[in-house]
Image (cartoon, grey):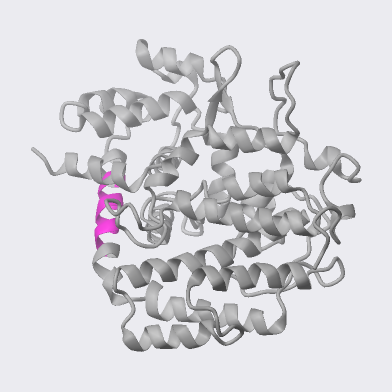
Amino acid sequence: MADKNTGLFAGLAVVPTHPRWSELTARPSQLYTRSDDIRSPFARDYTRILHSMAYRRLKHKTQVFYNIDNDHICTRMEHVSHVESVSSTIAGCLGLNTELTKAVAMGHDLGHAPFGHQGETILTKLCNKYISPEMKFWHEKNGLRFVDCVELLADNYNNCKNLDLTYAVRDGIISHCGEVDENGLRPREELIALEEEFTRPGQFQPATWEGCVVKISDKIAYIGRDIEDAVQLGFLDEDARNTLRKMAQENDHNAINTTVIMHNLIIDICQNSTPEKGICLSERYLAQLDTIKRFNYEKIYKNPRFDAFNRYAELVLSELFGTLYALYDGRHTFEALNSARRYYPMLAGSFEKWLSRYCETGTVPEGELKEEAFRCENRKIYGSLETPEVYAQAIIDFIAGMTDRFAVKLFNELITY
């Protein structure tokens, strides 16, 4: 196993001696500084993500199972913590930069919509119909959009500005797709324009070894915990549990639960990864991981018990979108939203406030909304709401940021007279 103090990858870690340190730590805009700050650029990214509203909302977003009132079912935030734990353990063992690894892990799922992957499917349909037939909503790219354009944090003077994370962390977020079956992950050489050149999930490998570690850790984390939740909720019958037990014990007769499986996979990566082979599992553990993933898709993710949830999620998100979209009236949209507050005070009111932060200040009406607009010194991504497509994107962003709980609350407002 690699030495924990040096590690086989110590010379490749993204630290100040790295040949591309300045490029990997570059930010879209200059952050305000503090003379007594003791954090590295990546540690600062970690805390900026930690304090963001998008991160806080992960605690009420579905991971796989919509069960917001069950405290023991994994939420998106808990999944993120698992990925951070797995990836930082591997990175520390290999000698990589654990601060960068933890920052990427912390931010990797900020782009997830409410209702898990079903939310992505629904938002893709809406994007196709109202923005572009070719547009697809995928959480990795939406994560980049959120950290670049949507999430705001107050500076020393309480003015809200964009997160402006480092290139390495932003890259790790958009390139973390764990759905592709692959082994021997190695960072790509070119530092591309992330927003422009990424057009599909998993198109490019991360630009850093640390990003590669997060990518493989994501798969280990979700496969293990999803099984645990499925067992607790009764999704697996006796035959399925027996099949799972055999798969789990294929390489270790003591593997009786998912914790042991995850431990074995972590150790195997630490023992087998080298700069020459990349971040990898041995052939036998890779085969086990792929077998368990196929089992999860067959017995869990495609389980008919999700059918009612999927229809409900589509009803909720589609109705929220449709209600707001019907209020579009060009530069007079704020007036239409204000009028709708008599019927939908939470939905129209919260969306008004959302728009005020991202529209040109001249578009925002006087009063509290104008004050909010002036306090936000961020990219005005919706301009003056010139087109229905821009307005539709604003609704997509608004919905994508919601928790399951908030989406349901707003939907209930629509059906309460």
Q: Residue furthest front?
A: 254
Magenta part of the protein: which range? 311-321
Could one spot residue 83 in this view of the protein? Answer: yes
**Rendered-image quadrant of the N terminus:** bottom right
Q: In percent of the image, x 78 and y 69: which residue is there?
A: 273
Magenta residue check for 67? no
Q: In percent of the image, x 77 and y 48: which residue is there?
A: 97
**Is 11 left or right of 360, judged from the image as shown?**
right
Quarter of image, res 62: bottom left
Q: Position of residue 223 (x, y in %)?
A: 51, 69
**Is 309 left or right of 31, judged from the image as shown?**
left
Residue placed most toward the observer, 244 or 201: 244
Magenta residue check for 319? yes
Q: Position of residue 304 (x, y in %)?
A: 29, 76
**Is 185 left or right of 158, judged from the image as shown?**
right
Q: Position of residue 351 (x, y in %)?
A: 34, 31
Q: In percent of the image, x 54 and y 85: which residue is there?
A: 249
Residue 48 in the image: above or below residue 321: above
Q: How many marks?
A: 0
Quarter of image, res 56: top left
